[in-house]
Image (cartoon, helix red, strand yellow):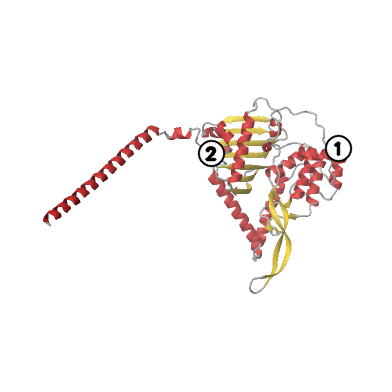
Amino acid sequence: MIVLKVRVKNMLNMKIEIRNLFLLTIVTALLNLAAATSSASSNNFISLDEFNSSPTRHNHRHHPSTHQQQQQPQKDNFILIDYLSDGERERRISWNGITGKETSIGDVSKSLSLWQLSDGKSFIQMIYTSDGQLMDCEYIRQKKLVFSFLNRFYDEIDQARSRNFTSPLTVPKKHHSLVSDHDFREFIDNGIVTSEMEDLQYSVQEFANGQSSAADAPDAFGLRNLTYIQLTSEDELPKDLHKQLNYRRLKHQCDQRHAQMRNLAHGLQSSDPQEQQTAGETLQRHRRDLSNMLRVPGTKWCGKGWSARNYVEMGGLSKADRCCRQHDLSCPFWILGFETKYGVFNWRVNTLMHCSCDERFRTCLKMSDSSDANMVGKLFFNIVQSKCFVLKPETVCTKTSWWGKCEKKIRKKRALIRDNRKY
């Protein structure tokens, strides 16, 4: 018995030694593997600058498309100024991750300017008066819209770079109207649209469609007199752009504007007569300011409201005036500023019109084929960017039971807000 116990004890000690030796072997192998991995990582390490310049790195904030990743125009800081023949000015700027585009009418002393900017994550557009007062703004965080703006922005830059900046396009001195006066009056009075008018309306394809030929691309783009400035330091920025490129400040400014509009709407619906009167006076002042900014010289009907004393009174620019008069008086569906109608509250100072009315207005201005009509179209569609609405029927419950079950339903028209097409 004594001998058996000794043998068992020796066997237990041997098992313990074998187990310890096995564990030591595993630990040694793991340490060797870790050392080899660390050595390989140190050999493959690259600096942050090398990483940023690597062609395989995809930064979607500044490289929205594959083509742009190859060209890489987004890394440049620049200003591109474009003066069109009809007086419109466009400024495109790229500065430290902020891309922006300003559109304004250069030959109107009291005019508006539209700013569209993006930091790669969100999109903001703001409408300013000539003295820098904010009239309206919109802040959006939809990725699809942000990428669409960036793609279009850099596509336009690529198109501009393909041209010779020292050779602006020449504009023919003699201009012939593409629509006869008789056909134009038939459209205004009776709504008759000829095949030539339809061809005129859709003859100029927008640059974003990419359907124009390489030879006609500059004309479709609309560039007339380009100035390209490469920016290497902040001192080279124009003074009026320093504040405009402060994206956080712009968002705060837009939030304040929306808060003012909410307070104004609350005051109009207040039960306090004094507060309601103050809000009404403020609204009228905003409408007068917008009217002055949108009033086109030489017209009686183009702008916010009209100055004509009767239906037949026209300004010197009669074709544009006829289009504006038709748009103001012939549209059966509209929503005034700060008015609730068709289930929608219009937060804007200007009137919302039905999309079919705005499209008819756009067609009329195109067929007018004159510089004044183009100026009206650019102010209305490209800068103010007035929204429009369509009416969709929906079922509404008008009477419910005690338990919440609908007992009576009716069909009502509800307005859905849409964006107008560019002019």
Residues at discs 1 and 2 in contact (Cβ within 8 Å): no
Q: Is residue 20 left or right of residue 232?
A: left
State the SS at label 2.
loop
Instruction: Classify the position of the C terminus by image quarter.
Output: top right
Residue 103, horizontal then vertical, whole percent: 66, 39
Residue of label 2: 97
Residue placed furthest toward the left: 2
Q: CA distance from mark 1 to mark 2?
A: 49 Å
Amino acid beneath label 2: Gly
Residue 151, horizontal then vertical, whole percent: 61, 38
Amino acid beneath label 1: Ser
Q: Earlier in the sequence, mark 1 or mark 2?
A: 2
Residue 120, horizontal then vertical, whole percent: 55, 42
State the SS at label 1.
loop
Vertical placement of residue 185 versus 256, above or below: above
Q: Quadrant of residue 186?
A: top right
Q: In the image shown, does 214 or 298 lie closer to the viewer? A: 214
Q: Is residue 284 left or right of residue 122?
A: right
Residue placed furthest toward the bottom: 402
Q: Is residue 298 visible?
A: no
| Residue at image coords 71%, 52% | 389
Residue of label 1: 180
Mark 2 surroundings: few (<14), some (14-19) or many (≥20) residues within 10 A: some
